[in-house]
Amino acid sequence: MKPRALVFDAYGTLFDVHSVVVRAGSTIPGDLHALSILWRRKQLEYTWLRSLMERYEDFWNVTEAALRSAVAQLKIEASERQLDGLMQAFLTPSAFPDVKPALDALKGVPLAILSNGSPRMLESMVGGSGLASSFAEVISVDRVKIYKPSPRVYALAPEVLNVPREDIFFVSSNSWDVAGARAFGFKVCWCNRSQGNMEHLGFSADVTVSHLGEIAGYL
Ligand code: 2OP
């Protein structure tokens, strides 16, 4: 496989969303593991619902609404200050440990990010991780004001990178994102970090790896 560009999903693939609650939730009473899982679940659900409703709000607002929904559902008593602490920490989730060496091993092929994140969130996250120089482009869905897996989102990558979709290798750990990207026409790598099952949506990955370091072996 000789792709002309590699495009990465951000949350869950390069950056660990669950690092946020671990780092900023220690003073909050309750089941923080359950909070982190439900927060992420709600965040994604709201992106899908808002896309269907044609009522886009950026990922920062979606993320805050998802957090408020999750704490209410779990009956967690968190103060405004504690919620704000979690939101601020969401601006700089930790990169997974395999990211930097994997990106270094992929030098020579243009790399990009295509994410639901708002431009401010992506700038803060990528800048704060020290990975900004690895990427030729960081592309936010905000340009088209709809979320993944809308094909309008995936279409941003060929447009911005000026590379045909079939020459792009898209990498995601989110199985539904893999299906959406494959349906659009990318070659797709599923980084199956959690050893989960593929969605039954009729589209599966071209390549499945368990960590990002394996990708270089397929190029
Ligand atoms: C992202 O677009 C799907 O949240 C994931 O970064």
Image (spheres, helix red, strand yellow):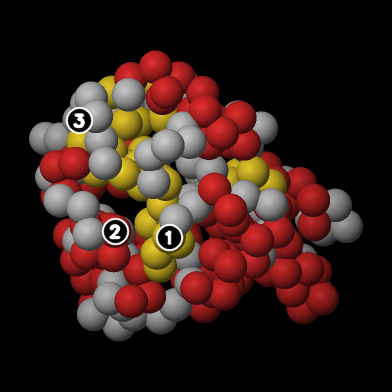
Dividing the picture into quarters, in which one does residue 169 lie?
top left
Q: Give the spatial CA distance, label 1 vs label 3.
A: 26 Å
Q: Position of residue 112 (x, y in %)?
A: 41, 52
Secondary structure of the residue carrying numbered label 2: helix
**Residue appearing at x 54%, y 48% in the figure:** 134
User: Residue 88's spot in the image, x, y percent?
Assistant: 72, 69
Q: Residue at x 38, y 75 (%)?
A: 142
Residue corresponding to mark 3: 204
Q: Position of residue 185 (x, y in %)?
A: 13, 45
Name which of mark 3 and mark 2 comes first in the sequence: 2
Left or right side of 11 for 175:
left
Residue 7 visible from this viewpoint: yes
Query: Image point 45% across, 61% down: which residue?
Result: 138
Marks 2 and 1 sit apart, C-alpha to C-alpha, by 8 Å
In the picture of the structure, the residue carrying the numbered disc 2 is: 161
For mark 1, give the secondary structure. strand
For disc 1, the marked residue is 137
Badge 2 or badge 1: first in the primary sequence? 1
Residue closest to the eye, 174 or 26 = 174
Question: Looking at the picture, does residue 5 appear above or below residue 195?
Answer: below
The residue under label 2 is which amino acid type?
Leu
Residue 148 location, quadrant: bottom left
Give the secondary structure at mark 3: loop
